[in-house]
Image (cartoon, rainbow, N blue to C red):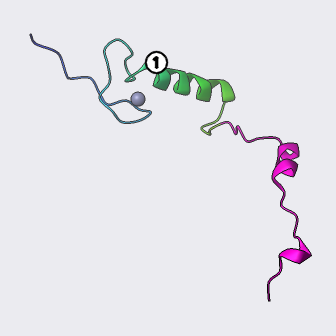
Amino acid sequence: MTEPSTLPPCPICGQPAQARYRPFCSRRCADVDLGRWFSGQYRVPSTEIAPDADEKYTRRVDPDDEVG
Ligand SMILES: [Zn+2]
């Protein structure tokens, strides 16, 4: 079996591209590139949690916890 391996590396992750998803290595990388096109810029969309959720994790300083 002769498999053509002349495909350029995936522009997203650099792994060997697959003929099925060329010029990418997988559909995931293709989606990533597509997302960049939609966003119009070459940056990853932030998926940070809402600031409100941080309130739950806010630790209160308890004076009694202070050990001399
Ligand atoms: Zn890739």
Q: Is residue 63 magenta?
A: yes
Q: Quadrant of the C terminus?
A: bottom right
The residue lying at 66 percent from left, 30 percent from top is 40
Residue located farthest toward the left when viewing the structure as drawn: 1
Read off the magenta span: 45-68
The residue lying at 40 percent from left, 23 percent from top is 24
Quarter of the view holding residue 63 = bottom right
* In front of the other: 29 or 54: 54
Quarter of the view holding residue 14 = top left
Q: Is residue 30 magenta?
A: no
Which residue in the structure is indicated by mark 1? 27
Quarter of the view holding residue 26 = top left
Q: Quadrant of the N terminus?
A: top left
Q: Position of residue 48 (x, y in %)?
A: 73, 42
Q: Position of residue 42 (x, y in %)?
A: 60, 37
The amino acid on which the numbered mark 1 sits, given as a three-letter code, is: Arg
